[in-house]
Amino acid sequence: KQEVTQIPAALSVPEGENLVLNCSFTDSAIYNLQWFRQDPGKGLTSLLLIQSSQREQTSGRLNASLDKSSGRSTLYIAASQPGDSATYLCAVSRSGTYKYIFGTGTRLKVLA
Amino acid sequence: EAQVTQNPRYLITVTGKKLTVTCSQNMNHEYMSWYRQDPGLGLRQIYYSMNVEVTDKGDVPEGYKVSRKEKRNFPLILESPSPNQTSLYFCASSSGVRGSSTDTQYFGPGTRLTVL
């Protein structure tokens, strides 16, 4: 059974710091992996989608990598800003199905 | 504007009273899905649909029904709600085209349901 883990559960950093969020999954048979952000009381916003054949994706200050063989993905946020404060979630899509499994998220606070 | 809409946004009901949460998308997406989000458990998939009249169970389908009669709509039905279905519910959609960048999921704003 696929399990997705995100560590740490919470993180607080000063503004301007570069940071890495981690996502681990137990079954490497995935179609893709997505990173989302969720603001309090709001829905999820997609940040990056990495296909199983890709190693990384970049969007602005965000870079996500995928290592299927080790079951890991990282989300790198460069030069963090207070506006980056949110909960970050990763989700994997199982091969052969259209099911999605989410991690429980990392709650990020960037201090001004 | 491309979006997924859900109604109602907030709902308080009593045990056993049938309810429907509507979900609609305007992106001509093939794939639609329902999730529930609970503290400490994260988002869990309830049901999903690959196309009109095609639905399948997610990881927590018990106590829920869905239908996909039109491409844009995917309502979630609780025929006899119970207190353990109190949760925050999200609808999502995507193109469903595997290997494509359009396979990214777009989420609705959420429906907060309380069952007394």
Image (cartoon, coloured by chain):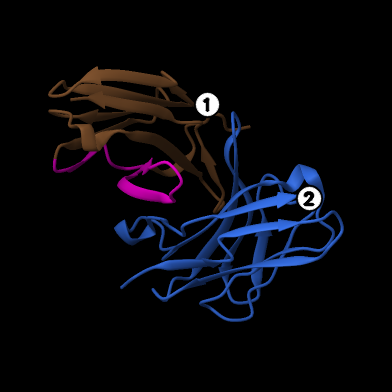
Chain colours: A brown, B blue
Q: Locate residue A78, reporting x and y percent.
A: 15, 29
In the image, what residue occupies the spot 40% across and 21% down? A10
Whether residue A76 is situated above or below residue B21 in the rendered picture: above
- Residue A35: give x, y in percent of width and height: 36, 40
Q: Is residue A27 left or right of residue A78?
A: right
Predominant SS of the magenta segment: strand
- Say which of marks 2 and 1 sits in front: 2
- Which residues, given as a range, are shown in magenta? A36-60
User: What is the residue that sits farthest to the bottom in this orientation?
Assistant: B70
Q: Position of residue A102 (x, y in %)?
A: 51, 38
What amino acid is labelled 2 in the image? Glu
Q: Is residue B107 magenta?
A: no
Amino acid type at circle 1 is Thr
Marks 2/1: CA–CA distance? 25 Å
The residue indicated by pointer 2 is B62
Q: Inspect the magenta stretch and tell me whether residue A53 lies in it.
A: yes
Would you place residue A59 above or below residue A85 in this image? below
Disc assigned to residue A11: none
Compare residues B65 and B112 and report the one nearer the observer: B112
Q: Secondary structure at mark 1?
A: loop
Q: How many marks?
A: 2
Closest to the observer: B52 or A19?
A19
Report whether B74 appears left or right of B3: right
Quarter of the picture containing the C terminus of chain A is top left
* Residues behind callouts 2 and 1 on a single chain: no
Viewer-nearest residue: B1 or A20? B1
Q: Quadrant of residue A64?
A: top left
Question: Residue tagged by mark 1?
Answer: A26
Q: Identify the subunit bearing mark 1.
A: A
Mark 1 and mark 2 in contact (Cβ < 8 Å)?
no
**Residue at x 46% of width, y 46% of height:** A41
